Image (spheres, rainbow, N blue to C red):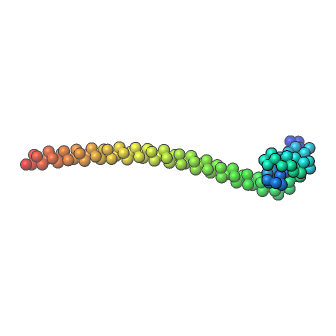
Amino acid sequence: MSSTQQALFWTKCLFCITYIEYPWIHKNCELCCPTCGKLFNAEECQDDVLIQMTEQEEKLAKLEQKLTENDEEILRLKDHSQKLLVKVKKFKERKKKLEEEKECVEKKFNDILS
């Protein structure tokens, strides 16, 4: 372990269950929780609690990454949808123009035949 790792320990506020890392010098001292403001005795947490915390943090980070990826995909799909809507509008305009031209040609053809 490095000297930095040895000089720190994890504790938790028993009132709001916030986990906090403090310098070793504060172990077993009465500290003020930065979250709820209440005083608590800074006892070192057991390793299994820290492992669970780390696992939960990793799961949360993965979920946040998925959300970011999903947000990016949603934006990509919105952009694609907008482009498709523009193409559909142009297609409808072109179809209408072709139908008008067809009517005009049919009318001229019928005029010729008459």
Find residue 53 and report its image quarter. Answer: bottom right
Q: Which residue lies furthest to the left in this view?
A: 114
* Residue 72 point in image, percent of width and height: 56, 46
Which residue: 35% across, 43% down?
A: 90
In front of the other: 105 or 22: 22
Question: How many discs appear?
Answer: 0
Which residue: 45% across, 47% down?
A: 81
* Residue 59 point in image, percent of width and height: 70, 54
Q: Residue furthest top?
A: 4
Find residue 3 and report its image quarter. Answer: top right
Residue 6: tell me if it is visible.
no
Which residue: 37% across, 47% down?
A: 88
Can you say whether 14 is above or below 21 in the image? below
Q: In this view, does 35 lie to the left or right of 66?
A: right
* Residue 85 point in image, percent of width and height: 41, 46
In front of the other: 13 or 73: 13
* Residue 63 point in image, percent of width and height: 65, 52
Residue 45: tell me if it is visible.
yes
Which residue: 85% across, 51% down?
A: 11
